[in-house]
Image (tube, rainbow, N blue to C red):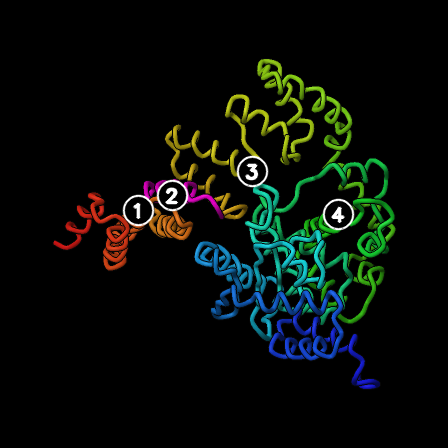
């Protein structure tokens, strides 16, 4: 632009990148000027349309965080996203020994293609979340099929990038920042993050994992389908291995060295005291040992799972149950759709796993019937991190369970979510929220919600009775 101030493609590209970094007040007039001057490529037009749609979002600012949510789901999602975002910032400040110079901005998009335009200027992006400096954009749970997306895991993954990029001034190899981010997913909770998937198993069987010195190529120049996903897996496992053997401070020291422009071989030799080639041998030996049974049994598992489908369709549970139990032992990490665990749950409601809300609801029902209400509530709470939208009943049941065990804070949160889910029976939802506030000793809030219940249904006797009790 200094050479040619009228070069519109450069102005458009600058505007799009300013928008990515959250500098919308500067980006929008620049892109509008480019558009009016006749430069109307897809990225320019799409980005302007996206920024126009921000009138449908609310922006919430609190301390070190900025949260942008679509108005139609902001009341429901805010307590969950706000809590996780604050928790991640607090954890990473201590862990990375770094205080950011400005707030973290998280944008949550219920329309996946809006998220894609936010990221690339074009639809069709396959990612779940993307980080631009201190700005993170990601899908909303409502933007994905239930059970296929763990939004909290994605949030922690992307927040790790924020700190890794800040610590290195964006001079960090792709494999290392992605490895740290994958590592952080399960560091916060062992149930989060991705399991050992079939693509990674095939890559290990076919000896396709890359040396650490050239692992970046797996992200930037993949040589076979699915290699990018395999590289995420490998990078995450490398960081797991380094922390387990050398400790977190070694990973942190490596991160800081990458910020000086040092390359992977030099950083490995300096901090691990080992040649990259020797590291590869030791790492692969560790990885093979930890995944040996699943890798060796994968082909047999695949054949037997396919063969079992006929018995599943016929509901021949006497044959299915022992076979599914055996397959679960061969490949315990597989918890996606059609897993042996899901088949067992359907067969006799005796096994649960994975990220599917329907299965977790079955588990919660069994636990509650077994006299374990707190464990039942925790089973339903896992859905909050997966698909907390479009399920008023789940929030109401979870609120009842938390109220039963005396956790009034979580009961209030869930009954609020029930109200914000726009239930058909609004009076009962407000009444339940009032009960939770009463149990917490917040009597003014209880009265306010009883009034709301009676506004929705003036003759609702439980609300009338409770309001009279609180008025004495």
Image coords of residue 423 (percent x, y): 38, 46
What is the quadrant of residue 282 in the picture? top right
Find disc 2 in the rendering and name its residue. 396
Closer to the eye: label 3 or 4:
3
What element does badge 2 sit on?
helix
* Residue at mark 3 to residue at mark 4: CA–CA distance: 22 Å
* Residue at mark 3 to residue at mark 2: CA–CA distance: 19 Å
Mark 4: give few (<14), some (14-19) or many (20+) Cα within 10 Å. Answer: some
Q: In this view, does 314 lie above or below 425?
A: above
What is the quadrant of residue 168 in the picture? bottom right
Find disc 4 in the rendering and name its residue. 229
Is 447 part of what is drawn in magenta?
Answer: no
Image coords of residue 436 (percent x, y): 30, 49
* Residue at mark 1 to residue at mark 2: CA–CA distance: 8 Å
- The disc placed on residue 356 is 3
Q: Determine whether label 3 and label 2 are within 8 Å by CB.
A: no
Q: Which comes before the other along the chain, label 1 or label 2?
A: 2
Between 345 and 447, the residue placed more toward the observer is 447
Q: Which comes before the other along the chain, label 3 or label 2?
A: 3
What is the quadrant of residue 344 in the picture? top right
* Residue at mark 4 to residue at mark 1: CA–CA distance: 45 Å
Q: Which residue is drawn at 30% across and 46% down?
A: 432
Find disc 1 in the rendering and name its residue. 432
Q: Determine whether label 1 and label 2 are within 8 Å by CB.
A: yes
């Amino acid at each position: 632009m200094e050479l040619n101030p009228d070069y519109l493609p450069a102005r458009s590209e600058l505007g799009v990148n300013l928008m990515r970094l959250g500098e919308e007040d500067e980006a929008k007039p620049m892109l509008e000027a480019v558009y009016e001057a006749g430069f109307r490529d897809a990225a320019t037009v799409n980005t302007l349309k996206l920024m126009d749609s921000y009138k449908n979002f609310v922006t919430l600012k609190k301390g070190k965080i900025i949260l942008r949510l679509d108005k139609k789901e902001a009341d429901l999602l805010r307590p969950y996203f706000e809590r996780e975002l604050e928790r991640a910032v607090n954890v990473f400040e201590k862990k990375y020994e770094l205080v950011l110079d400005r707030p973290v901005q998280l944008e949550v998009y219920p329309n996946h293609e809006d998220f894609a335009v936010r990221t690339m200027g074009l639809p069709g992006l396959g990612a779940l979340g993307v980080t631009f400096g201190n700005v993170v954009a990601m899908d909303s749970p409502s933007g994905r099929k239930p059970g296929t997306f763990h939004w909290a895991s994605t949030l922690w993954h992307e927040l790790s990038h924020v700190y890794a990029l800040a610590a290195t001034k964006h001079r960090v190899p792709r494999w290392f920042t992605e490895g740290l981010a994958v590592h952080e997913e399960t560091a916060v909770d062992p149930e989060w993050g991705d399991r050992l998937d079939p693509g990674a198993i095939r890559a290990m069987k076919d000896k396709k994992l890359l040396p650490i010195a050239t692992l970046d190529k797996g992200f930037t120049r993949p040589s076979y389908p699915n290699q990018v996903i395999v590289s995420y897996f490998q990078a995450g496992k490398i960081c797991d291995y380094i922390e387990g053997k050398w400790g977190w401070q070694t990973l942190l020291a490596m991160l800081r060295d990458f910020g000086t422009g040092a390359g992977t071989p030099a950083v490995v030799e300096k901090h691990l005291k080992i040649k990259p080639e020797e590291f590869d041998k030791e790492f692969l030996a560790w990885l093979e040992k930890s995944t040996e049974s699943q890798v060796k049994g994968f082909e047999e598992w695949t054949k037997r799972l396919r063969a079992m489908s006929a018995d599943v369709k016929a509901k021949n549970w006497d044959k299915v149950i022992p076979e599914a139990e055996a397959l679960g032992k061969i490949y315990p990490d597989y918890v996606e759709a059609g897993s042996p665990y899901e088949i067992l749950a359907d067969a006799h409601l005796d096994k649960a796993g994975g990220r599917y809300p329907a299965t977790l609801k079955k588990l919660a029902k069994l636990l509650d019937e077994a006299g374990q209400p707190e464990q039942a509530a925790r089973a339903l709470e896992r859905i909050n991190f997966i698909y907390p939208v479009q399920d008023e009943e789940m929030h109401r049941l979870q609120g009842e369970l938390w109220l039963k065990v005396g956790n009034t804070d979580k009961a209030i949160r869930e009954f609020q979510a029930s109200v914000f889910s726009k239930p058909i029976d609004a009076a009962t939802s407000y009444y339940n929220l009032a009960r939770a506030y009463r149990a917490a000793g917040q009597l003014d809030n209880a009265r306010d919600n009883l009034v709301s219940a009676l506004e929705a249904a003036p003759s609702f006797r439980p609300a009338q009775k409770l309001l009279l009790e609180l008025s004495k």
